[in-house]
Amino acid sequence: MNSFNNNQDYYRKLIVEHYSKPKNKGFKNLPNSLTYHQTSESCVDNFHIEIFIKNNIITSARFTGVGCAISTAAIDLFCILIESKTIPQVKEIINNYQAMLAEKEFNDKIIENMIAFKNVPRQRNRIKCALIGINGINKLIGSDYEKYRNGD
């Protein structure tokens, strides 16, 4: 992972940028979109997630709410990454991202810019921040995602 070490400043700036000016913040309120409310018991992270799936492809991924720099940047970058991806592709991204945060083997090409959160496990309490929005999306695309249609 030398490429990560060579780009640490870039990834720090990327996190700050997506925290201060998130690109996918704000719902589109599309008909038949799926929404989920995800909160943290231990901090201020509180997000509502909205995805729209058409023909097994996520065509829109958005969020509203507040959170720390890690949680906000992670959900924003993840929303960008998963748009135009199939549900199986998104599940593969989630599995690799979770593996990275668990300090297990993962494919950095699959998670793309989510590699910015590679150092999060150094502060174990921040892993929840890096996962909160992603866990919400994982629930939305799970086998029982129909129950999240238009609410939680």
Image (tube, helix red, strand yellow):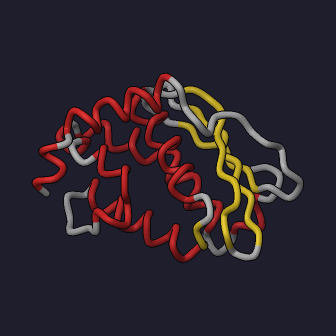
Report the residue at 51% width, 43% height from top: 75
Side of 152 relative to 32 (left or right) = left
| Numbered disc total | 0
Q: Give the vertical position of 93 relative to 23 (above or below).
A: below
Report the residue at 55% width, 32% height from top: 22
Report the residue at 13% width, 45% height from top: 5
Side of 5 relative to 35 (left or right) = left
| Image quadrant occupied by the N terminus | bottom left
Q: Which residue is more in the foreground, 110 or 35?
A: 110
Residue 107 position in % (x across, y down)? 28, 68
Dividing the picture into quadrants, the one containing residue 129 is top left
Side of 93 relative to 13 (left or right) = right
Q: Which residue is more in the foreground, 130 or 31?
A: 31
Dividing the picture into quadrants, the one containing residue 7 is top left
Residue that extends furthest to the right in the rendered view of this protein:
31
Report the residue at 77% width, 63% height from top: 147
Q: Which residue is more in the foreground, 125 or 57?
A: 57
Residue 42 position in % (x across, y down)? 43, 31
Residue 117 position in % (x across, y down)? 30, 44
Residue 68 position in % (x across, y down)? 44, 26
Q: Give the vertical position of 39 relative to 112 (above or below).
A: above
